[in-house]
Image: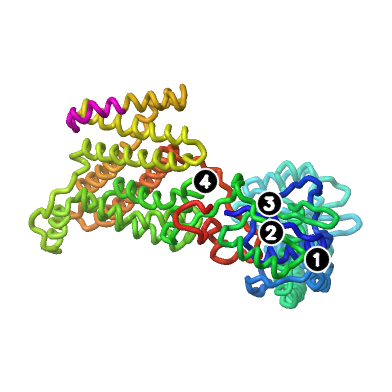
Amino acid sequence: MQKVLILATKDSESRLISALHRSGVMEIRSLELAGLEKGKPLEVHDAISHELVRVRGLISAFASLPFVKRESVEAKVGEPDYVKTLSEARKIAIDDELRHLVDRRAALISEAAETDKKKAEITAISAMPGIDFSKLETKNFTYALGSVKRKTAPAFRKDLDEYLNKESEIITAPYGKDDELILIFYERKENISFVLSRYNFEKISLPEGFSTFEKGVASLEASAAELKKSVSETEKRISSLSSENYGKLAALERGLSTLSMRAAIATKFASGRKIVAVEGWVKKKDSEPLSAMLKKDFAGEAAIEEMHGDEHGAPVVLDNPKSALQFQWLVEFYSLPSYDEFDPTIILMFTVPLMYGMIVGDVGYGLLSIALSLLILQKFKGGMLGNIAKIWLFSSVSAMVFGVVFDEWFGFSHLELAEWLKSWGLNIGIEHSLYTGLSRSHELSLVIGLALLVGVLHLSLGYILGAINVWEHSKKHAVAKLAWLALLLGGTVAVASLMFNLVPASIGNPAAIVFGISAVAVIVLEGLPGLFEIPGITANVLSYARIGAAGVVGVIIAEIINTSLLPTPERSIIMFPIFILLHILNAALAMFESIVQGGRLNLVEFYSKFFQGGGKAFEPFRMDAADDSAAHPQQAEDGRGKTVR
């Protein structure tokens, strides 16, 4: 990356911003310079922001209505003009009308729902046809209509008769499964509310002016039809407004967003009465073209200067082949490397599948891993699950290779699988064992030992990368990393020789001396913290034993499935679905365990030896965020598998 400083005349500020935005190669940083003030937004900022909020509000209003068909708009953003864009935005003055139509539609829908509710309520009195309820309300008489539980209806009627001295008319009819519909016609002077409440009388309210059931239903249906027509007419007008304006609004929203970004970016400048200063970062390959553009379009108005020797705070751009992007996602998910650190993407591209294969380690499960990964990718192209599925898919080949090494085929050996298939009449031509694989369930010590060896080599690579990362900044820390490397290798060889007799004593004794000298070097270079961390390196190495342990667990489960539920011609064929399902579940468990354990060993044990992280992604000031580089903002063209400098 290259830090640059641009000095320009105040009069050219707006044009300079537009030119930088179109070029899209410079990340602009906030700048403070003695003698200059903090920059302010361009004068049009408030007007642009007001119209942008208004246009987005209109778009949101249309988007919230499910019946509105919205025009598709080209994603590419053209070069907007402040005056023209503001003028076009102000011409679309539909705010009040749209607000009125949306409110009216909501009110009509609410009224229609209330009408439907009333219609549902009066169906209760269908059991009382012919009664004109409008004539039951007089100067001296009134009525109550409702329901009570059928089992309490006789007692309710008896209490009413006693209270009203039988000077009332009570009509009942069945109402639902457990209730009784009751109409009480009584003198207005009587207060029967306490009797009604005692029996949980559920009152049914009829619309004002309601007469008979038949006429009431007809009236409500006519009202519902009229409301439906009004809703339809309102929606038609809203749809018409959308057809006339939505495409324009979407284009204006893009244009106004672009202009808003430009107007606001000036706050990062240092500004004076006649000059503005802009500081930021560009990729080294873009520095010369940017300089040429400024000389051509801003001759006598702007000048650019490369700022050498100051890489503090430089943004990070990662560049890796397309096949490694899922592992680059893993790097970014944890943390971007700082500007002067090594990008571990390519290393993870090999170490993650290696550990995945050692844990899954079954040809059949490798095939299931491919199938399950492809199934996930059908629904999730990106995001966390999509990228994990891509890692699984890439790593499945390693699982199949180790499956051959371990001679595991859905928990069978190749000969056992051939014999089982033969029992079903499928002869694949294997009568004798073709080779002897490394059985994880029978050679657990050897498998664990190989996992620990992988750990030693993995951690050694971490220390080497750590020394490379800090060499230019601190030779002392680089030498300390190399001392840790010697301590790790010396200790490993010494333990293998003197404790387990795996290496001749003629090698083990010098290794022990190397270990001792390295330990002293670590203490001298790093002080007491180094002394206390020495036992931790043993724990780091032993953590890799989980590779073997997790793999053996999967093997044991597969063998249990094959022993207990293996379908044979003598057994019912109904065992097949259960047998297959359990193997799929075991494969999925192995896939999950592999990504968790492998991820931990890579991102915790390995990373701790060289990786600091905390890098800031390169975010250039540009117009079009829909191109491929925006989809992968850490990807660039300045090298392969390393942090761009």
> Spatial distance from mark 3 to mark 4, Cα to Cα?
19 Å
* Label number found at residue 397: none
Residue at x 53%, y 45% (from the top left corner): 338
**Could you tell me which secondary element the residue under label 4 belongs to?**
loop
**Main SS category, magenta section:** helix
Residue at the spot of label 4: 340
Residue at x 54%, y 65% (from the top left corner): 628
Categorize mark 4 by other alpha carbons within 10 Å: few (<14), some (14-19), many (20+): many
Q: Which residue is the extreme one toward the left? A: 432
Inspect the magenta stretch and tell me whether residue 97 lies in it.
no
> Spatial distance from mark 1 to mark 3, Cα to Cα?
41 Å
Q: How is the image coloured?
A: rainbow
Which residues are drawn in magenta? Answer: 501-514
- Nearest the eye: 625 or 172: 625
Residue at the spot of label 3: 29
The disc, 2 or 3, on the residue closer to the chain's N-terminal end is 3
Residue at the spot of label 2: 304
Q: Is residue 225 visible?
A: no
> Spatial distance from mark 1 to mark 4, Cα to Cα?
55 Å
Categorize mark 2 by other alpha carbons within 10 Å: few (<14), some (14-19), many (20+): many
> Spatial distance from mark 2 to mark 3, Cα to Cα?
15 Å
Q: Quadrant of residue 372?
A: bottom left
The type of residue carrying mark 2 is Ile
Tell me where residue 1 appears, x and y as whole percent.
57, 54
**Could you tell me which secondary element the residue under label 1 belongs to?**
helix
Q: Is residue 607 above or below residue 643?
A: above
Tell me where residue 19 appears, x and y as whole percent.
70, 66
